[in-house]
Each structure stands twice: as C-alpha cells, then as structure tokens.
C-alpha cells in the first residue's frame, strides 16, 4: 500500500482535488491519500502557509499531489511553490504540452516537453535593497544545477524516443550566468550523439514557438525562462487548465496543476480539473502504474472527442462534478 500526500490548496483547489481523488479511487489501486490544507486555508486556521504536519507527511510519503496554492501578495511571504521546490531539492520541473482532442487552438498536434531548472536563477529570491529607489536581484546559476537538469532532459529524450533537445538561454547578454548554462549544455550534448541538439536565445525561442511549435521536441532552460515558456506552450494547447506539471528530485516528487487558485470562481463547481487530473497520471507513471495512467488519459480523450461534456473554459457548460462523472463513466 502506497500513501500519497495530497495538498488541497485553496480557491478552486479543494473542488478539483475532490474530483481527481474520486477518479483515482475508482482505479482500485493499493493507494491511500493523506489530505491536507495548505496556503490561505491553512494560514486562516493555524497561521502557517505550510503546516508542519504537511512536511512530516511529505518526508514520510515522498510523493505529493498538489492543487493550486495561493501565496499572499506582499512583504514577508515567500511563494509556497518555491519553498517546497527548494526545501525538497525538486530540481527538475517537467511540463509536457500535448494537444488534446477537439480543443480549438491555433495549432494541432503540439507535443513539447519543457525541462525547467527549478531551484535557482532569480527564484532564489535573493534581493538587495541599495536604497529606497534601487533594488538588485541576484541571478544564481551553478554548474551543478545546470548539469543535472540538462542531463535529465537528454535522459528523458532517450527514454521516450524523442529526437531533439533545445537549450534556451540569453547568453548573448548574460555572458557569465547564461553562458555557464549554455556551455554545460554544449558539453553534455556531446555524450548524446543520438539526440539532435540546438540552442536558441530566449526571445527567438518565443517567436519560433508561436510561428511553428512543431519544430520543438524537448526544451531545457534555466528557471525564469522555463516559467515563462511553459505558460506560452500551455497557450498553444488550450491554456493552463490543461497543462500538468511534475517537480522531481532525487528523493521527492510533487505533481501539480500549474494554474492559479482562481478565488473568483471558488465554490461554484465550475473549475476544470483536467490539469490536476493529468498531473495525477504523471504521478501514477512515476510510482509504477503506467497502464492505469493510460486508462485515465484514454478516458479524457474519449470525453473530449465526444464534445458533450466540457467545462466553461473549454467552451462547454459542465460542472466540475459532471466532468469527473463523464471520466468515471468511461473508466
């Protein structure tokens, strides 16, 4: 029996979590779930965005399914997501953008996987106040972090039968920091002669993505660019509501929906649970249940193909519950 730590988050988080757990329970796998609040819901009850009980569960179970969590905007609060990634050294943020059936987008058959370095760059949050009118932010790039995310991207390409890895950088301006990331990429690429490699400056990569996304396969980049470009690729397939994400380290893994907590529609039973559901499929593959993950993705494809049950963001009128019911009926 495998136990999964589940963070319900806040906003629409509890609603989509309930929908996803209903579907996972229907698989009748030897899985149990420890469910916790985190974010604003937790802060309201215990004064902490991430209660100690959450950390105790993560350390014990090592696998987490996480719904969207709100970080209060203002002084004194670090991003909950960044805290978790850094605390558990979840260095590889993997975001696959894969076209889904009958979702109207400018492009079809998009299939891009972004590998985002997840522990450093500007996301360390190191800022220096020079004066009331000047603040410096520290961009941290190390060889250690660069090499392991780049190797992870090439290893994934080999394991999944992918043909190309693209490095995204700004080494023409940031010659030392992004220059180090690029040089690590060029060195490591030589060890994978079976995989085509290329590098693109980040602004050019953005342009190429919206002109011809089919030229890309696996992409690897530092933290900030990965955050921006993965949102861009989500727009190519229908938005953040259909983009899953995995945060992988040597000892821990967190699977999540990357969209926000959408407090404006919380409690209305209208949120799309697809991103979190697809993240749960990612999780099932990770813990050794690829056939069950495919059962869910096949059910998703069937529901979308039929075009009868869709949430509002996908052009339909179905509730969160009705969408989950449709998936369950296919299972």
Image (tube, rainbow, N blue to C red):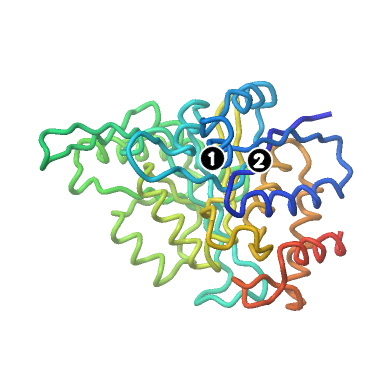
Q: Residue at x 56, y 35 (%)?
A: 248
In what quadrant of the picture does the C terminus appear? bottom right
Tell me if 86 is positioned left or right of 59 in this view: left
What's the CA distance linking mark 2 and mark 1?
A: 14 Å
Height in image: 330 above or below 150? below
Q: Earlier in the sequence, mark 2 or mark 1?
A: 1
Q: Position of residue 120 (x, y in %)?
A: 36, 33
- Checking the image for residue 65, the label placed there is 2
Quarter residue 210 falls in: bottom left
In what quadrant of the picture does the N terminus appear? top right
Q: Residue at x 75, y 65 (%)?
A: 323
143 or 49, nearer to the observer: 49
Q: Residue at x 58, y 43 (%)?
A: 246
Height in image: 44 above or below 264? above
Instruction: Identify the element where label 2 is drawn.
Output: strand
- Checking the image for residue 39, the label placed there is 1
Q: Residue at x 34, y 42 (%)?
A: 74
Quarter residue 125 falls in: top left
310 or 15, nearer to the observer: 15
Height in image: 297 above or below 107? above
Q: Position of residue 30 (x, y in %)?
A: 86, 35
- Checking the image for residue 126, the label placed there is none
Instruction: Identify the element where label 1 is drawn.
Output: loop
Mark 2 or 1: in front is: 1
The residue carrying pointer 1 sits among few (fewer than 14), some (14 to 19) or many (20 or more) residues within 10 Å by Cα, namely many
Q: Position of residue 76 (x, y in %)?
A: 35, 33
Q: Are marks 2 and 1 in contact (CB under 8 Å)?
A: no
């Amino acid at each position: 029996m495998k136990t999964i730590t589940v963070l319900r988050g806040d906003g629409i988080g509890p609603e989509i979590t309930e929908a996803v757990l209903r579907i996972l329970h229907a698989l009748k796998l030897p899985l149990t779930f420890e469910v916790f609040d985190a974010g604003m819901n937790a802060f309201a009850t215990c004064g902490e965005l991430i209660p100690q009980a959450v950390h105790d569960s993560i350390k014990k179970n090592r696998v987490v399914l996480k719904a969207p969590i709100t970080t209060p905007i203002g002084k004194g609060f670090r991003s909950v997501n960044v805290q978790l990634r850094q605390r558990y050294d979840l260095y590889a943020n993997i975001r696959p953008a894969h076209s889904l059936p009958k979702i109207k987008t400018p492009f079809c058959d998009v299939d891009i996987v972004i590998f985002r370095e997840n522990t450093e760059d500007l996301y360390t949050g190191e800022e220096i106040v020079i004066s009331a009118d000047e603040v410096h932010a520290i961009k941290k790039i190390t060889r250690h972090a660069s090499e392991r995310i780049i190797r992870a991207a090439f290893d994934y390409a080999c394991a999944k039968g992918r043909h190309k890895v693209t490095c995204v950088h700004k080494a023409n301006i940031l010659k030392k920091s992004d220059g180090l990331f690029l040089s690590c990429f060029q060195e490591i690429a030589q060890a994978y002669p079976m995989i085509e490699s290329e590098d693109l400056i980040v602004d050019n990569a953005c342009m190429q993505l919206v002109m011809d996304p089919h030229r890309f396969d696996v992409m690897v980049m530092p933290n900030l660019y990965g955050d921006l470009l993965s949102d861009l690729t989500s727009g190519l397939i229908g938005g953040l509501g259909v983009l899953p994400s995995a945060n992988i380290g040597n000892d821990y893994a967190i699977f999540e929906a990357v969209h926000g907590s959408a407090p404006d529609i919380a409690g209305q039973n209208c949120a799309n649970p697809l991103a979190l559901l697809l993240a749960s499929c990612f999780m099932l593959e990770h813990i050794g249940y690829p056939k069950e993950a495919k059962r869910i993705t096949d059910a998703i494809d069937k529901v979308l193909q039929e075009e009868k049950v869709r949430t509002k963001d996908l052009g339909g009128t179905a509730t969160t519950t009705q969408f989950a019911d449709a998936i369950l009926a296919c299972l």
